[in-house]
Amino acid sequence: MKSKKEKSTDQDDTPKVKERNIRKLQKQVEELTKEKDKIFEQLQRVSADYTNYQKRTPKQIADSVSYEKKSIIRSLLPSLDNFDHALAGAESAESAESVIEGMRLIFAHLLDALRAHGVKIIETKGQQFDPALHEAVMQKAETDKADGIILEEFQRGYTLNGQVVRPSKVIVNKLPADDIAEDINEDGDEGEEASQADQENDTDRQE
């Protein structure tokens, strides 16, 4: 059993321990409060930055679009000036050929201006029909040409940086099914004849 002196010491230490614990807890509370305030300030800054970003972004996009429009229009103005001069001089032109030549030059200049912005003409005549690039407005049957070949261009198409702005409107060669089968058979016969010729050449070399 504890003596009276030891019991007295324990009773004296108890308030001191409690006081130390209270001070420790108060210190932790103060540190947590400071950390909370710091995080809250950071959150407020992030929120303000995001709000400003939302306000700036539409204006930046609008400014960028406006700049691109100005750039395109500026590149087309020389062609417009040339066209204006050509119209003014058409009445006094000595021949229709000179007017036509002027139109060709204006067209070439306009096309160069569009190419500078990534515009390209879609190839058509003699090409295989591609639904991603071409729009068939009519079909013809020309037996001396392969099925699916583009025969004529009705309206020129263009791409911008590889993406179709407007597909080319074309007339496509469409052979009857019998003619297609006949072409396939002829190709097969030619292949067999070539194979037989190769085998005969191999036999001659072995002999």
Image: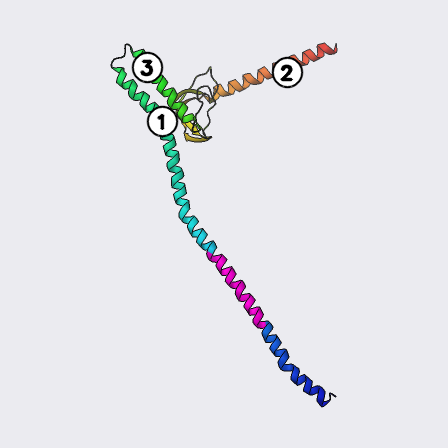
Residue type at the position of mark 2: Ser
> Residue drawn at (61%, 78%), measured in percent from left and top?
18
The quarter of the picture where the N terminus appears is bottom right
The quarter of the picture where the C terminus appears is top right
> Residue drawn at (45%, 51%), measured in percent from left and top?
50
Residue type at the position of mark 3: Ile
State the residue position of label 3: 100
> Residue drawn at (43%, 48%), measured in percent from left and top?
53
- Residue 81 position, x and y percent, is 31, 23
Residue type at the position of mark 1: Leu
The magenta-colored residue range is 25-44
State the residue position of label 1: 76
Colour scheme of the picture: rainbow
Q: In terms of image quadrants, where is residue 9?
A: bottom right
- Residue 141 position, x and y percent, is 42, 19
Of marks 3 and 2, which one's residue comes earlier in the chain?
A: 3
Q: Is residue 205 visible?
A: yes
